[in-house]
Image: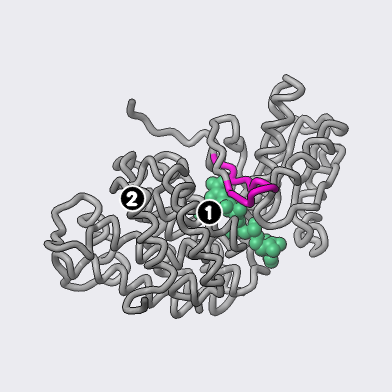
Amino acid sequence: MGGFYVPTKIYTGESAFENLKKYPIHNICIICDPFVAESGMIKKPMAVLESMGATVHVFSNITPDPSTNLVGEGVSWILEKKPDAVMAMGGGSAIDAAKAISFMYQKITDSPKPLCIVAPTTSGTGSEVTNFAVITDSATHNKYPLLDDKLLPRIAILDPTLVRSVPPRITADTGMDVLTHAIEANVSTLATDFSDALAEKAIRLVRDYLPRAYRQGEDMEAREHMHNASCLAGVAFNHASLGINHSIAHIIGGRFSIPHGRANAIILPYVIEFNSHMYEKHFQTDNRAAKIYAHIGIIINPGTYVGPQAVRNLTVAINKMNKELEIPSTFKEAGIDEKTFMELVPEMAEIAVADKCTATNPRTITKPQMVELMKRIYYGHGQK
Ligand SMILES: NC(=O)c1ccc[n+]([C@@H]2O[C@H](COP(=O)([O-])OP(=O)(O)OC[C@H]3O[C@@H](n4cnc5c(N)ncnc54)[C@H](O)[C@@H]3O)[C@@H](O)[C@H]2O)c1
Ligand SMILES: [Zn+2]
């Protein structure tokens, strides 16, 4: 079944919140992380909403990688407020929590879904335009990507001034999340010309603007383009879905509290090698994924590369980018305890193979192959 549509209305620029005046909002719940509330950033949408005469309630308890317990707490809170709109303001964690809370609210009350508005304050997850919400099981620490069209926000506010304060470490991690979304969407088995166009543009924007945003957070041209790149990659993967890079990042992030984007960045070169069959006997670039990786390699690092060298060019370019952004090159370097990791690998591999994102990976993967891949990401090449 073909087709391409973007159900979320996207407003951009410093005055983007003004567009809320077009909607009949009377009673709104803002769900955000503490930074958003404490930094005063929340005053910008509040001024607009109050000028409209809306009653505004704020829930600012969101913590990174929102848990089932936190979502439960948010649902109890929102049930008392009975809003006609919900606004998420924060990074992917606040956005996913808000999406899950309003979804549950609608299920429980059987009322019309509150108008869902999302204003991202990091340039990373693209969650403002996706039907995903990643929630962590409070008991097992496994992360589950929930997938339902009812999770799709109606309105996305891309105001670049909201990301000016993101520190370099989080700029780097979230920026590499954007690159991973775009690359995984590009090689996904569900990719189309439409999603490819958006993914490729996102890759070019990351190439040109992530190093600038990382080095100089006040560079608003770089911030604006990275914010757009995040959203473009979000639309691309909402259409084409993702792959095993995210399957592995979900379980590693949940079990070892590695920030989502950093986990993706560490994993990315190894998944490219696996998907393109780089370490198998007669490595050829005649498989679909390898051809696409070669093309992306030339976008990121233009040159006269052909065949296997063009795919290696991509992994070399990503390793170089990770180094520049001070991202570790292995799970070991990221500080994950060796004994704990090795004990958990069989179970984590099973969970990663069953993750929803695995279904659209360009190469199928068995549990033993996943164990081997995870160990390779732990030690890197040439070690153990
Ligand atoms: N739903 C999706 O489509 C999707 C896609 C990818 C990832 N995710 C999920 O999103 C979460 C990660 O989101 P994230 O990478 O945006 O990080 P995050 O939301 O966890 O935020 C990371 C940190 O950045 C801080 N922060 C946020 N905005 C800031 C600002 N403007 N200035 C300074 N600090 C700021 C937060 O307070 C927090 O401490 C993970 O749980 C991941 O699994 C969801
Ligand atoms: Zn991601």
Among the 4 quarters of the image, the one containing residue 2: top left
* Element assignment for label 1: helix
Residue sitting at x 59%, y 55%:
254
For label 2, the crowd category at 10 Å Cα-Cα, with few meaning under 14, some 14 to 19 and many 20 or more, is many
Span colored in magenta? 132-143
Q: Which residue is mark 1?
A: 251
Percent coordinates x, y for residue 296 in the rendering? 29, 61
**Mark 1 touches mark 2? (CB < 8 Å):** no
Percent coordinates x, y for residue 289 in the rendering? 25, 52
Instruction: Kindly identify which numbered label has been placed on residue 189.
Output: none
Could one spot residue 191 in this view of the protein? Answer: yes
Quarter of the image where the N terminus is located: top left
Q: Is residue 133 a member of the stretch shown in magenta?
A: yes
Q: Is residue 84 left or right of residue 235?
A: right
- Amino acid type shown at disc 1: Ile
From the viewer's perspective, is the residue at label 1 or at label 2 nearer?
Answer: 1
* Element assignment for label 2: helix
Residue sitting at x 22%, y 63%:
278
Q: Which residue is mark 2?
A: 186
